[in-house]
Image: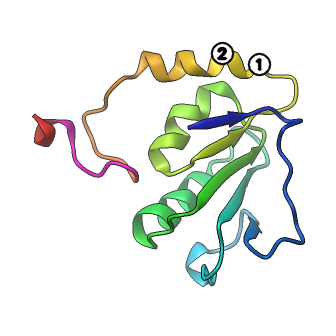
Amino acid sequence: MKILSFTEHNAIASDSSVIIMANDADPRSLSLEGVHRIDLHFPKFTYGRAYSQAFLLRGRLGFQGEIRATGDVLIDQLVSMARTGFDVAVLREGLDASAAQRQFDRFPAFYQGSAVDTQPLFAKA
């Protein structure tokens, strides 16, 4: 997963290949033709609807482009974001992106499958 600081993120609203999706939008209602990036917003770190949206986009709708997490994104959320289909996370303003890799190092493998890697761990052995 690529981690961006708040200042590195630039969502180009006029670019037709980028969709900024509202939290109450249903991903199944989108036309994904020609879309290369979808920004999903976390208004608060406790509000997790964007996880479900990412899982639908990646797992069920087969979206192959970039799914970017924006808003109140904390380092503690990054592993769950990667497992539900996010490619890029834009950390909340003021957070240090260098601490993010430690989260991924803590959890090198998972028993169950995810939106990205659907095979469970026991099936890989």
The residue closer to the viewer here, 64 or 121, is 64
Side of 19 relative to 87 (left or right): right
Residue 98 position within the rendered picture, expressed as x and y whole percent measured from the top left = 69, 17
Q: Please, is residue 26 above or below residue 113 in the view?
A: below
Q: Main secondary structure of the magenta part?
A: loop
Name the residue rendered at 51%, 41% in the picture: 82
Callout 2: SS: helix
The kind of residue tagged 1 is Asp
Give the magenta part as a residue range: 116-121
Q: Is residue 49 visible?
A: no
Residue 25 position within the rendered picture, expressed as x and y whole percent measured from the top left = 69, 72
The kind of residue tagged 2 is Ala
Q: Is residue 74 visible?
A: yes
Look at the image and tell me in which quarter the C terminus lies: top left
Name the residue rendered at 80%, 32% in the picture: 5
Side of 20 relative to 50 (left or right): right
Q: What colouring does the structure picture have?
A: rainbow
Name the residue rendered at 64%, 79% in the picture: 34
Separation of marks 1 and 2 at Cα, in angstroms: 6 Å
In reply to whether residue 119 is colored magenta, the answer given is: yes
Q: Please, is residue 111 above or below residue 61 in the view?
A: above
Any mark on residue 99, and which?
A: 2
Residue marked by disc 1: 96
Side of 48 relative to 120 (left or right): right
Residue 11 position within the rendered picture, expressed as x and y whole percent measured from the top left = 84, 56
Side of 90 relative to 62 (left or right): right
Callout 1: SS: loop
Name the residue rendered at 61%, 57% in the picture: 66
Circles 1 and 2: CB atoms closer than 8 Å: yes
